[in-house]
Amino acid sequence: CIGARVICRRNIDFDGGMVNGTEATVKDIVWDDKDNIILPTSNRCIFPNLDRAMTVTLPKQIELELDNGSIYKMLPDEVSFKDKNGIWMTRRQFPLSLGYAITVHRSQCMTYNKLVVDLTGINWKPDDQLSLKSSNTDTEPSSKRRHLKRVTCQTSNLDVAKATRKPEHLIICERQEQLFCGRHVLRALSQTLDLFDDDYLKEVAQNIAATEQINRHGEAIQLTEYYYENTGEYDIQVLKAALMNIFNIDLIQIGTLQPNSLILSHIKDVQAFLIQQNYHYYCLRRFRLTEDYFFKIDSKNPTYHEPIHRDNILNFLKSLLEHGSNICVTVQYISDAIEDEITTDNIKTRLWALPDAPADREALVNI
């Protein structure tokens, strides 16, 4: 409803600032035909009119006021995907959730003008220390901040020349466990440890096997074609399906480095590559405030992330292909319709498909 506080749940428009996690307030809801709207005009029961609900359409657009005061006009977003039974489905919606309150995980790396911390009560003792990172430049008199005297505020500087955070401090990378590099690389790509656990990946593999068995008219399919439970080895199809299910991201394989390829002609705009080298997965990923470099994120070497300047990325990929590696690019998937194909107009947005991570919000140094 108008006035509601909402959060965007998808990367829609990077240039317009409407990305996963953007907070906004609903200012207006614009309809094509107001006759399709069911509104309670009185205190009488509206349930007898619910047969009209089948004809209700989505609004033409929703006008959102961003925190900087600008107005963003959001149009319905349509995505196509396969369910767990392999059936193609299309969903058309406004990717918004109510955002009056958010979890601590969602608030990670957000910047707010003011932060109030209540240090009273039984959970705090006189000697407790709380360290906060903030970009707040508000200089209120100390008399107004007496209740925050135990809070140490540090200003986060995003200037590349003055930043002090090493890539290893911010980039998420698990240490290699048996052959679970499939799980490791998905978490490295998404920069979160909360997704892609092994139970989920096994379920994805089982669904792929079940779908393939249907396509082969009941022919028996071995699950080991897609994963080995004892070692944690996952087929690339499992990783591809998992990324599609969670982020609506497709993996497009690069077989040759043909300069006339649309993706390769925009190779410097790619956000991430997934590499399969000798049955081992790792990724190359860029971050917003250090966009000139790809970082090699490999679970075999979790304490060092080799930086590769994007001017040199083609030579690096060429060497991988010469040694038989498989290379995939992460691309935002919309649908298989012709009008949703990747074009020169949308390729930059489509190539930056993964949600922002802590390493996107702070310049990385020691490169």
Image (cartoon, grey):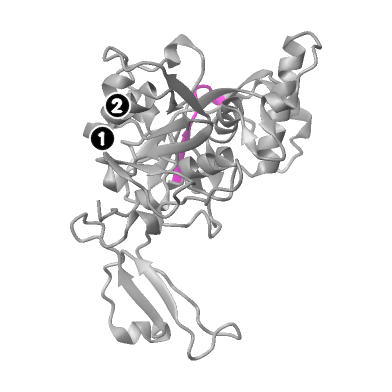
147 relative position to 87: left or right: left
For residue 36, say whether it is visible. yes
Instruction: State the image coordinates of residue 71 (x, y, percent, origin top left).
Output: 35, 41
Spatial CA span between label 1 and label 2: 8 Å
Mark 2 residue crowding within 10 angstroms, few (<14) / some (14–19) / many (20+): some
Left or right, 279 with reference to 226: left
Residue on which disc 2 sits = 267
- Residue at left 53%, top 39%? 186
Q: Main secondary structure of the magenta part?
A: strand
Q: Is residue 304 above or below residue 131?
A: above
**In the picture, residue 342 is in which quadrant?**
top left
| Quadrant of the image occupied by residue 349 | top left
Amino acid type, callout 2:
Ile
- Amino acid, disc 1: Arg
x, y (%) of residue 274? 45, 32
Give the residue at the far left of this rendering. 161
Q: Check residue 204 in the rendering and tell me which mark sits there, or answer none.
A: none
Residue 177 picture location, percent across and down: 59, 48
The local crowd at label 1, few if under 14, some if 14 to 19, many if 20 or more residues have their Cα within 10 Å, is some
| Badge 2 element | helix
Q: Which residue is mark 1?
A: 310
The part of the image, by quadrant, that contains residue 144 is: bottom left
| Disc 1 and disc 2 in contact, CB within 8 angstroms | yes
Asked whether 282 falls inside the magenta stretch, the response is: no
Relative vertical location of residue 87 with respect to residue 155 in this rendering, above or below: above
Please state the horizontal and vertical placement of residue 279, each as a whole percent of the image: 54, 31
- Quarter of the image with the N terminus is top right
Query: At 32% across and 50% down in the image, what residue appears?
Result: 68
Segment colored magenta:
24-34
Q: Kindly state the secondary structure of the residue where label 1 is placed.
A: helix
Which residue is more in the foreground, 73 or 255? 255
Q: Earlier in the sequence, mark 1 or mark 2?
A: 2
